[in-house]
Each structure stands twice: as structure tokens, then as C-alpha cells.
Amino acid sequence: MDEIGLRWLLGQGVSLVALALCLVAFASKRDDRLFVLLLFANVAFAAQFALFESWVAAGISALIVLRIALVRRFRRNRAIMLGMLLATVAVALVTWSGPRDIPALAAGLLGTYGMFMLSGIPMRLALAAAALCWVASNLLAGSIGGTIAESLIFLTNVITMLRLRRDARLPCAP
């Protein structure tokens, strides 16, 4: 098998690992479990984008691993959030190749704000918007598995928001 074919297959395989991790993460009603699983999924996404030579998306996905670790410890910390937003822009500037990098940058910025400053349904709304940006980024990179993964992440996220909303309406048990 030639190098391009092997690289493509590896990228698709890694994206399927990320898919499994993300579906379990977004199905969780617990924010802490969501963050831990997303940490591992973003390692896989960073590797996938690197295999597809989509460097802005790879860099931002790798940065998301740090962001998730920081969010778990410094939630609602505006200074750290601003530092992560600046780091996201810096990664994009260093690796920029053109307009096809805009969706990955938008996803990184939306996700950073959502994870640091929001929780519950509002956080998942921001992450759903970021997922749509990642769908576009995966399409532009040529990742079939990543496109499916992010589309399913979006859908799973919406379903979880509906579950959370339903749970908030249920009367408390005695």
C-alpha cells in the first residue's frame, strides 16, 4: 500500500477511536466525565488531522487537550480562558494555510468559551456549534470518519440537552 493510502487509512482509523470516545462523552449527563473523555478524544482528533495534513485543526485539537485539563481545574477563570483563546489564535496563525482553516479556528474559540464560562445546556449549545464547525473542518480535510464522528457528536449533544431539559422538568422524588 502506498504512503498516501496508508496515511488515509490510519487517519480514518484514528477518527473512529475519537468517535467512540466522543459519543460516550456527550451521552453523559455529568460534565466532569464529559471533559475526561473529550481529553482522550482530542488526542485522537489531533493525530487524525496531522495524518490528513490539516495543521491548524491538528494544532487546535492538541491545544484542546490542554484546555480541557485547565477547565477541569480553573473553571470560569477569565484570565486562563483569555490565555487559551490567544493560544488558539496563535496556533492558527503559525499553521495557517488559507480559508479552509477558518472552521477549525471557529470551533476552537467557541469550545474554549463554552467550556470555561458555561455549564449544562448552555455549554453543550456552544459545543454543538463547535461540532458543526468541526464537521466543516473534517469535510475540508477529507476525513470521512471525522465528519461522521462530529455529526454524531452534534446529534448526541442535542439529545443530551433534551434529556437534561426533561430531567429539569421532572418533579423531585421524596
Image: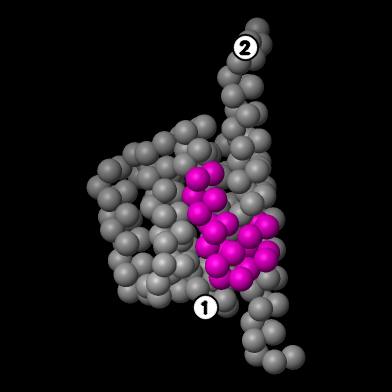
| Badge 1: residue crowd in 10 Å (few <14, some 14–19, many ≥20) | some
Any magenta on residue 69? Answer: no
Any magenta on residue 145? Answer: yes
Measure the C-alpha gap from mark 1 to mark 2. Answer: 51 Å
Q: Mark 2 points at which residue?
A: 172
Name the chief secondary structure element in magenta: helix
122 left or right of 78?
A: right
126 left or right of 26?
A: left
Q: Is residue 153 visible?
A: yes
| Residue pictured at 54% horizontal, 51% vertical | 132
Q: Residue furthest toward the front? A: 99
Looking at the rendered structure, the kind of residue marked 1 is: Glu
Where is residue 50 shown, x and y percent of the image?
Answer: 53, 75
Q: Mark 1 points at which residue?
A: 53
Q: Which tag, 1 or 2, sits closer to the chain's start?
A: 1
* Element carrying mark 2: loop
In the image, residue 111 above or below residue 66: above
The disc placed on residue 29 is: none
| Residue pictured at 50% horizontal, 73% vertical | 54
Where is residue 43 shown, x and y percent of the image?
Answer: 54, 65
| Residue pictured at 61% horizontal, 54% vertical | 150
Q: In which quarter of the image is residue 59?
A: bottom left
Residue stretch rendered in magenta on the structure = 128-149
Q: Residue furthest toward the left? A: 79
Give the quadrant of the C terminus.
top right
Looking at the rendered structure, the kind of residue marked 2 is: Cys
| Badge 2: residue crowd in 10 Å (few <14, some 14–19, many ≥20) | few
Where is residue 26 shown, x and y percent of the image?
Answer: 61, 44
